[in-house]
Structures are given as C-alpha cells and as structure tokens.
Image: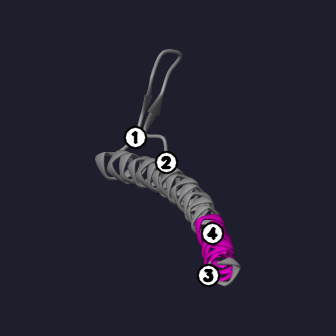
C-alpha cells in the first residue's frame, strides 16, 4: 500500500488519518504475527526438550528394571540349585 503524502517539509511529513490508521494497523499486525511465531517456536522447543528428557528418563527406568529382573532371576536360579543340591547331599 502506498501512502499519499499530504504535506512534506524538511522536518515533517503529514499523512491522512485513514492512511496513518492503516499504517499503524499493518505495523501492529506484523508485530503480533512475529511475536506469535516467536512464542510458538519457543513453546515447541520447550515441548521437544521435555519429550527428550521424558524419553531419556523412561529409558533409564526400563534399563534399571531389566537389570533388577535379571538379578532377581539369577538369584532365583542360584537359590533353586543350591536348595536342590543341599537336599541331596544329606
């Protein structure tokens, strides 16, 4: 949109009220759009970081539980054989 200059001098430029309102609205709309894009990007970054941490924590928990199950299985297996051989030694 081209603004028409009503009066121009060395120190000032004068626009019509309608042109000035249009300019202000356009600049405000652009500022709101940029702010919304910035907030959206920041929000998505925060969600991505949260998701990565959640996946990391879940993976660690699963690995710990698998280790605990393996240890319990080995203890149970060892316990079975030691009980079996103790009973037959007598």
Residue lying farthest to the front in this orientation: 90
User: SS at mark 2?
Assistant: loop
Q: Residues within 10 Å of mark 3 (few under 14, many from 20)?
A: few
- Check residue 80 for magenta coloring: yes
Name the residue rendered at 68%, 72% in the picture.
78
- Check residue 65 for magenta coloring: no
Residue 34 numbered tag: none
Please report the bounds of the magenta region as a residue range: 67-86
**Location of residue 53 (image quadrant):** bottom right
Majority secondary structure of magenta residues: helix
**Location of residue 67 (image quadrant):** bottom right
Residue linked to disc 3: 87
Name the residue rendered at 56%, 62% in the picture.
61
Residue 44 in the image: x percent, y percent? 53, 59
Task: Of the two numbered discs 1 and 4 on the same chain, state the one appearing first in sequence.
Answer: 1
Task: Of the two numbered discs 2 and 1 on the same chain, state the one appearing first in sequence.
Answer: 2
Marks 2 and 1, how far apart at CA: 7 Å
């Amino acid at each position: 949109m081209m603004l028409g200059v009503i009066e121009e001098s060395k120190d000032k430029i004068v626009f019509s009220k309608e042109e000035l309102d249009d300019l202000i609205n356009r600049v405000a709309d652009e500022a709101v759009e940029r702010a919304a894009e910035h907030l959206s990007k920041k929000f998505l970054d925060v969600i991505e970081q949260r998701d990565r941490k959640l996946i990391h924590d879940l993976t660690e928990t699963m690995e710990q539980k698998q280790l605990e199950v393996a240890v319990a299985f080995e203890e149970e297996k060892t316990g079975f054989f030691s009980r079996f051989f103790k009973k037959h030694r007598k």
